[in-house]
């Protein structure tokens, strides 16, 4: 028989073979905010910071919007050409390294938010990446080049 709400008892029961590989286990439990190990739906979550957004529906909506815009920012930083061809190699290299560093940090923040295992946060992250790519990475909003086509992408997909 499985224990009720004691995290230590859960881990001991699990270690003795009491659970299966697809069971949801509460790893750590604080009053009011459980930490899930599988995707769940609801506004009671903890995203990025201890106690945030908590049990407040308005703060949860703010967290969803925040994660959405973080994902859009990741796509902007990945696809925006922020300096022209006339920039010096050293300045351009340092600037692009700084942008890459910021993009990596923001990407990790989105990943950590998704690791809250909240379905709304997950959908906000995926939706933010999709909208960001649509706005900044797809050909829809690219300026045409002198040859009449959309400006070339940075990545090369040869062989596909």
Image (cartoon, rainbow, N blue to C red):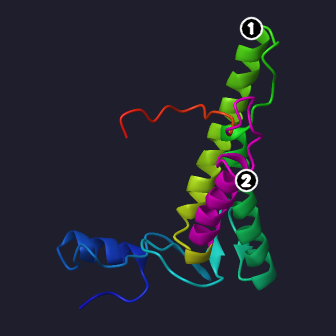
114 vs 11, nearest the viewer: 114
> Could you tell me residue 51's position as x and y percent?
70, 69
Residue at image mark 1: 90
Q: Which part of the image, by quadrant, shows the N terminus?
A: bottom left
- Residue lying at the far left in this picture: please name it: 17
Percent from the top left, x then y, of residue 60? Answer: 73, 76
The structure residue drawn at horizontal position 55% and vertical position 83%, both measured from the top left corner, is 41
Magenta residues, start to end? 121-149
> Does the stretch in magenta take in 145?
yes
Please state if 15 lies on the left or on the right of 105 as rendered.
left
Q: Secondary structure at mark 1?
A: helix
Q: Is residue 24 left or right of residue 140?
A: left
Tell me residue 6's x, y (percent): 42, 81
- Residue 26 occupies which quadrant of the picture? bottom left
Name which residue lies at 60% across and 85% down: 42
Residue indicated by mark 2: 135
């Amino acid at each position: 028989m499985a224990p009720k709400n004691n995290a230590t008892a859960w881990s001991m029961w699990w270690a003795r073979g009491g659970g299966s590989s697809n069971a949801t286990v509460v790893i750590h439990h604080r009053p009011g905010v459980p930490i899930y190990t599988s995707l769940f739906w609801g506004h009671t979550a903890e995203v990025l910071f201890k106690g945030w957004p908590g049990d407040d529906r308005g703060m949860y909506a703010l967290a969803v919007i925040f994660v959405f815009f973080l994902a859009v920012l990741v796509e902007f930083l990945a696809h925006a050409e922020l300096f022209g061809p006339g920039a010096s190699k050293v300045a351009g290299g340092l600037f692009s390294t700084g942008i890459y560093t910021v993009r990596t940090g923001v990407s990790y923040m989105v990943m950590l938010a998704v690791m809250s295992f909240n379905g709304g946060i997950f959908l906000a992250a995926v939706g933010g990446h999709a909208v960001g790519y649509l706005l900044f990475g797809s050909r829809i909003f690219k300026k045409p080049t002198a040859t009449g086509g959309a400006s070339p992408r940075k990545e090369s997909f040869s062989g596909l």
